């Protein structure tokens, strides 16, 4: 019996031990750096500019009438979305919601808004502005 015990001890000791694996905490993804805040002055200047320029898009309504797409008495708003770059230029200009169905009006708005000089923010700023038309020429 002592032989059997020795054999069992030898066999039992010859097995390799399993490595102990410690649990690892999950790695949290890095958050992107916070965007630099844009000054309040930029937004005041932008609001003043858009107020001054509202009459500059009146000819876009006339383009829609001339193209036969508007009757001349239709009322409604057109939402224009764009990004203002730190250089004060509009980019990615597009028409969002529109109560007026006129491709000529929309094309004119995109071209006109793209041509303006804007206040220069510290980073790209997304902006939307609704131009309202009361109808009549």
Image: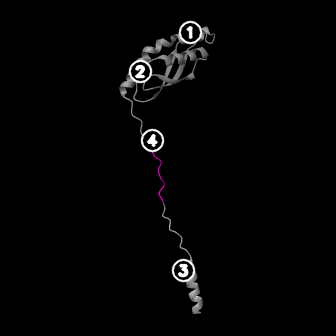
Q: Quadrant of the N terminus?
A: bottom right
Q: Residue at x 56, y 80 (%)?
A: 12
- Give the residue number, with chain letter if any, for mark 3: 13
- Give the residue number, with chain letter if any, for mark 1: 62
Q: Earlier in the sequence, mark 3 or mark 1?
A: 3
Q: Earlier in the sequence, mark 3 or mark 4?
A: 3
The furthest residue to the right: 68
Q: Residues within 10 Å of mark 2 (few under 14, many from 20)?
A: few
Q: Label 3, label 1: how many angstroms apart (C-alpha)?
A: 95 Å
Q: Label 1, label 2: how many angstroms apart (C-alpha)?
A: 25 Å
- Give the residue number, with chain letter if any, for mark 4: 32
Q: Label 3, label 4: how many angstroms apart (C-alpha)?
A: 53 Å
Res 73 seen here = no
Res 45 seen here = yes
Q: Label 4, label 1: how many angstroms apart (C-alpha)?
A: 46 Å
* Residue 45 image offset from top left, x and y in percent: 38, 21
């Amino acid at each position: 019996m002592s032989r059997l015990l020795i054999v069992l001890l030898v066999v039992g000791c010859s097995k390799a031990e399993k490595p102990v694996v410690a649990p690892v905490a999950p790695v949290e993804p890095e958050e992107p750096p916070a965007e630099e805040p844009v000054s309040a002055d930029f937004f005041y200047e932008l609001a003043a500019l858009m107020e001054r320029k509202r009459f500059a898009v009146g000819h876009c309504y006339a383009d829609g009438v001339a193209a036969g797409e508007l009757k001349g008495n239709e009322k409604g708003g057109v939402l224009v979305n764009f990004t203002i770059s730190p250089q004060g230029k509009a980019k990615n200009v597009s028409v969002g919601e529109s109560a007026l169905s006129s491709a000529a009006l929309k094309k004119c708005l995109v071209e006109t808004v793209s041509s303006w000089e804007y206040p220069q923010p510290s980073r790209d700023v997304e902006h939307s502005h609704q131009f309202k038309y009361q109808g009549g020429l």
